[in-house]
Amino acid sequence: MTLDMSIAHMGEALRAGTTTARALASDALARIDARDAALNAFVLLTPDRALEDAERADAELAAGRDRGPFHGIPYALKDIYDTAHIRTTCHSRLRLHNVPSADSVVAERLRDAGGVLLGKLATHEFALGGPSFDLPFPPARNPWNRDHITGGSSSGSGAAVAARMVRMAMGSDTGGSIRGPAAWCGTVGIKPTYGRVSRRGVFPLSWTLDHCGPLTRSVEDAAITLQVLAGHDPQDAASADVPVPDYRATLQDGVAGLRIGVPRAFFMRDTATAEVLDGIERTIAQLRAVGAVVEDIELPDYALFAAAGRVIMMAEAFAIHQADMQSRLLEFGEITANRFVLGAAITAADYINALRARRELTDAVNAALGRYDVLLTATALSTAPRFDTPVDGVASNSPIQTMPFNVTGHPAMSQPVGLSADGLPIAVQLVGRPFDEATVFRVGRTIEILSGWENVTLPA
């Protein structure tokens, strides 16, 4: 099966002439047709666009025009990314008929890299409220067990990769919306440094916290994708003009001599399951065994990061949606409306104090990363819950442990490390210095090998 090959191997096969971009696209579309009715990962399929992209990729390769390692590779986009002449709904009634005239920067870069667009993926409404059954599309289901949620809000992205419908799906991350679904669906999910990937043309949730990044089957797939996406966009005010390294150059270098800090107080809580804690400890032992120095560290209390993030997110989300909340309230899903309205109660003083706390918390993490190459912590304190016992991913007691690094903007990646006794994925989270995604990938690749995750068969 062609899509069971890595992105790099697909590229090799395309250039060797043993497959074609059209064959890759056709295989992906057949998988989606066979599997997605039970998973609801896609809200819109674009088969005509996929075959058009594939035929162009094949013709260019035949003519000697090689756009790079993503040339001819199928992918899908979370349905908050604008796509020219293709509906972008944000999984909401309010935007059911929204057809952008231009691509988002991410969609443009993937197309310019020769990628093959398969369609648009389910999210939580406006990347916040869900999982919900009162929206225009059903919530995505977890391929490991369809009675369990995927996590949000990049729910369709996590499901599509875990179900082997696609090797890469774009997500977005404001409080953990890439890393949460990655952890609960058993994929790699990278939130790059704030400003590393342009957000222009992506519907915002919180200007201060929003990041764009991929969910993928493997660390190498993520590195190849970020190579395409990273770079300065002068029309995105938050975009950073920082050089982009070769993300695969050190991918196989191992961790001998690297220093890894573990903020143990973050995840040593009553709500953490024994299997998640065992997965973290096993990973620490494996890293030490191959030469890494792994030590416990202290950071400011997790609750401070979470509180600052919630205040910033809810204040900015309310500002974005205020006009529609006042004029079209009943068109929102119940969960979304209940969350957005909380922003109305946040005062200017609350917001300014949260921004001040953000600066201090960022300094504290930077200080720790002055002594350590990466930090290692939990992505989630439990495996994916059932639909009949859902959790609020924004609440202070959420099992998702990702908000701190939206607040600080550091690159952070969820890396699967195994399965629980009930067959659901367990993950760890790796955090790097600003714009040092390469070291995060390097450590993640080592964990991928040591844990044996690369040999785990994903759900069919």
Image: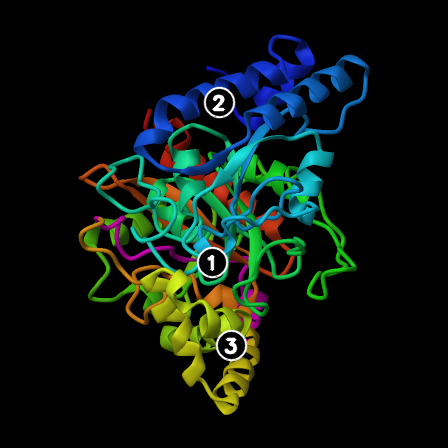
Callouts 1 and 3 close, C-beta under 8 Å: no
Residue density around tag 3, few if under 14, some if 14–19, many if 20 or more, within 10 Å: many
Left or right: 142, with 443 as reference point: left
* Tally of numbered discs: 3
Pick whichever, 126 or 322, lies toward us. 322
Residues drawn in magenta? 364-386
Looking at the image, which residue is at 72% across and 29% down? 68
Which of the two residues, 362 or 394, is positioned nearer the viewer here?
Answer: 394
Estimate the spatial distance between the alpha carbons at disc 1 and disc 3, rounded to whole Å.
Answer: 27 Å
**Local SS, label 3:** helix
The amino acid marked with disc number 1 is Phe
Which residue is at the front of the view, 349 or 34? Answer: 34
Mark 2 packing: few (<14 Cα in 10 Å), some, or many (20+)? Answer: many
Which residue lies at the image location 68% right of the left edge and 45% below the top edge? 103
Give the quadrant of residue 177. bottom left
Q: Earlier in the sequence, mark 1 or mark 3?
A: 1
Closest to the observer: 208 or 281? 208
Inspect the magenta stretch and tell me whether residue 365 lies in it.
yes
CA separation in Å, label 2 and label 3: 45 Å
Write down the residue under mark 3.
361
Of circles 2 and 3, the one toward us is 2
Q: Quadrant of the C terminus?
A: top left
Q: For the view shown, which residue lies furthest in the front direction? A: 327
- Label 1: which secondary element: loop
Q: Is residue 9 visible?
A: yes
Please, what is the three-letter code of the amino acid marked with disc 3? Leu
